[in-house]
Image (cartoon, coloured by chain):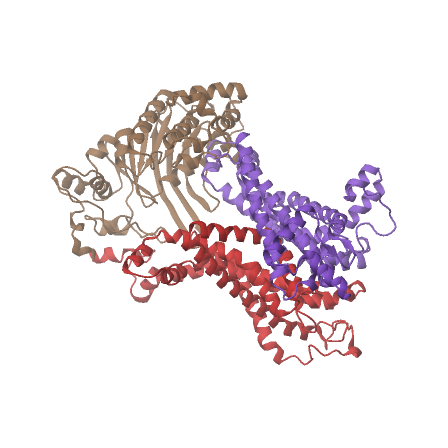
Chain colours: A red, B brown, C purple
Amino acid sequence: MSDELRESTSRDGITGEKEKGLGAFRKRVVSSNFFIYAFRRNRLSVIGGICLAFIVLMGLLGPLFTPYDPVKPDMASASLPPSSEHWMGTDALGMDVFTRIVHGARIDILIAVIAVLGATVAGSVYGVVSAYYGRWIDEVMMRFLDSMQAFPTILLGLAIATVLGPSMRNVIIILVVVNFPMYARLMRSQILYLKEALFVDAARTVGNSSLRIMFRYLLPNSLGPVYVQGSLNVGWSVLMAAGLSYIGLGVQAPDPEWGLMISQGARQMILGEWWSAFFPGLFIFLFVLSANLLGDGLQDVFDPRRR
Amino acid sequence: MSLILGGGRLSNTRTKQDVTVVEQPDSVLLRIANLRVMFNTYLGKIHALSGIDLALHRGKITGLAGETGCGKSVTAKTIMQLLPKTAMVETGSILLDGKEMLRKSPAEMESIRGKTIAMIFQNPRAALNPLFTVEQQLHFLLHRHEYLDRKAARKRSFELLHAVGIDTPGRRLCNYPFELSTGMCQRVMIAMGLACEPKLLIADEPTTGLDVTIQAQVLDLFRHLVYEVGSTAMLITHDLGVIAETTDYMGVMYAGRLVEFGATEDVIDCPLHPYTQGLLRSSFTGEDDDELHYIPGVVPDLLHPPAGCMFKARCGVCDKDCERAAPDMAEVANEHKVACFKAGTTQTMRQQGKDVTVGRTDEASLS
Amino acid sequence: MVRICYFILRRLLLVFPIMLGVLVITFAIGRIIPADPIYLFVGQETDRALIQAIREKLGLDQPIWTQFYRYLRDFLKGDLGMCWSTRNPVATDLARYLPATFELIIVSLIACVVLALPLGIFAAVKRDSLGDHVSRIVSLTGVAIPGFWLGLLLIYLFFFRLHWAPPPMGRIGLRTPIDSVTGFYLIDTLFAGDLGAFGKVWAYLALPVTALSLRKLAQLTRLVRSTMIEVLSSDYIQTARSHGLKQPLINYRLALKNALLPPITQIGQMFGDLIGGAVIIELVFAWPGAGRWAITSALAGDFAPIQAFAVICAVVRVLSFLVSDVLYVIIDPRIRY
């Protein structure tokens, strides 16, 4: 009777007979159900993830396969519409749009990833320090963040770009500066919550120093929302980098950054040659959409409520 | 054949299912027959209710006991037709005064809810709209069913709050739910439930989450008011103490089935189903032993319900019959029904003072 | 009422430290980061004597604290510096160009709110209907579309191909004179009774507003929808249903009031975000607003306009937060101060 008891949850639903071996084990392992469940619930996120991976792959491997030169003008082939030779046409300087897009993927992805990582690290450190020391240090640090966040982000970016000058490196710096407050707040609220947790007191009584406590115990436990925020941020960073480049205060010619390509193609658009501005924007859209979908899916995974 | 509806009007347009020939006043207000409810989820089909047969006697309070997830709330929500979209009533009938509830249209149910059948919920603070005052929320209800205007509604609300034992009704009417204590919120809920003098009042875990002292007050109030208004009540709870003190009849549910039913005194004094016995042993500590009693094992998975009796995995007296088929409710004594093939055995063991689940409490068998 | 007044006062007090921080930040960006800040403030000027004069005037040879003090003092006096591209004081140019920007932003904000609320509510109430799917698609895609790209596409489609929209050459084209009193053309043309011009102003506003507001529309719709869904599955709505209250009453009064709270906060944030978006949109549509002016100055290496514009926008943003917070407190009685 007691054996029945132990295995009562893995009986065949129809015959009532005991399920033996791997079948019984699998049924009781929640994870397999979880993955199927997660996939069914988040079909869109998986699609987003695949699309994102595809674009990244294109950026990494694509340049090996493109026949045209992305930065050398070829006035003879200027402004050609999409055809079998030029899948996405050529721009005003005769460069193949598709080739430039493939090469440009690297730029935007690199900018976004480095910027988000940088903002995460900078923001996390800022947030942890602020939360851990508390009281007036926390107050001052948070007020400073308030002031930073009072600016519309693009304006802050523009101001810094004006001073530092336009370049890819500066775009990354701007993105880090503009994004880090969000992570700082996130980490801070996590830390404030965990600070009261029992295991921190336990660590302190055993003799860990403050720094060690902060980085070894508090930080790793607070990372869940950061992952979610980070993936959503990657998309937004690309938009901002493209925007800055479009204005002219970001990546400079002749680099094939997608936003810059749009501004270069803008003049053509008014004349009816839509392709040189259309395709870069399309790719920005796809990239940001995929990153957002993936981020939403991650949110479902990491959010403890997990609906 | 003459068709008589309530007030004696004749109508030929109603179908047979909505009307029953009433020869004499029926002592049963609500009759649930073979109710099967299923939920469609991503994980599969969950059989929440597997054939419930229940009868609520007019003017009496019937309790429904059982663990979390046994289907008590689902039963209540099916009566009210407040189930989520994923729920499906496979078969069954719910007859209120002879009228089939499950065939009513949503519009008809809207008129019935709050007026003919009312419900009060667990967690009264969360059950009241945080952005509207007590008066406003009562007004919506009274305006809907009794067409009272602001002034009349206010007067009636005042009386209602007084009836549920709130000392300063005037002030409380202007309060928002967050300004009231939990006990007071539950009184307001009871006031709203009884405002239109419903035929049936369902209370779903009304005292869970309240302080023990407040629990007693609220239950007293509940009992008192239900009798005064003349309603029939269904009290759902997992707390057998509440059932013992407040109800006239009680039913015990397990894994989507009703396993025992009868007059409260009968069931408490002489529980026949092994599960009921186990529950009672777990609830009533005291007497000589200070061991904590419990029923070992877990509730079966409702996604893949086992064949035969649902309780067989945790039962001390089950045998081959129990494995083959699920027992139906059978009347053992006056109005005392039980769904168990071994009811005779359990009755004898009980009389002998032996515990049905005695083979289960030793630690070795649970490693 | 008293409660709300106290709340406003307390929040207004908070504005000052934030504003101080804003000024500190712009000062730091302008004066501390660059090696020799003078070139940020003289643009293309090459006359050495003039440069030296400006250096003295701005006090760039003074210690940092003095500089900051002078900066603060000048700012509060209204002296925001000179814009070298236009040879005007920044304050003059700002006064001239700001109304155009604000008209664009305010119309976009109203469009967003007016469209997002019904869309989100409808999607939540009629879940899994066609409208719900449409709103979800809009929410997901709208956030991913770059505003400037959308602007260009709209111009191409509606101006170049269909000839429905006017050319992207500003607010009203070159042939319609407007006697501008407030700087807000919609108001000015109405007051003047010139309905033809009024219509034209709308025609010119249509595409920029669409490009600007789509992203925020998507975000707001999503928030309204998810908040409404959450509210509709709450305990107190179940109570309302158990009382047999009619669906329209439940949806549009009992649930909606609760569902409005997070969107109000987001609408307050939106105003600030729209300013950022407007800056680029103005560039795309050659809209004569403060954003375009600030950018062209920045491209010429002129820092004072961007500095002033950034500070003004920060003020506006903080005030819009305040307004949305006040609205929140009015609706939600649970907040007490």
Compare residues B25 and C67 and report the one nearer the observer. C67
For image coordinates 61% across by 67% down, the residue present is A170
Q: How many marks?
A: 0
Compare residues B222 and C116 and report the one nearer the observer. C116
Q: Where does residue B178 sit, x and y in percent of width and height?
A: 44, 33
Residue A274 visible to the viewer:
no
Which quadrant of the figure contains the N terminus of chain C?
Answer: top right
Q: Is residue B162 left or right of residue A78?
A: left
Compare residues C273 and B238 and report the one nearer the observer. C273
Question: Which corner quadrant of the image does residue B273 belong to?
Answer: top left
Q: Is residue A252 left or right of residue B134?
A: right
Q: Where does residue A187 sit, x and y in percent of width and height?
A: 46, 56
Q: Where does residue C305 sit, x and y in percent of width and height?
A: 71, 55
Question: Which corner quadrant of the image does residue B149 belong to?
Answer: top right
- Tell me: residue B322, above or below residue B137: below
Residue B23 visible to the viewer:
yes
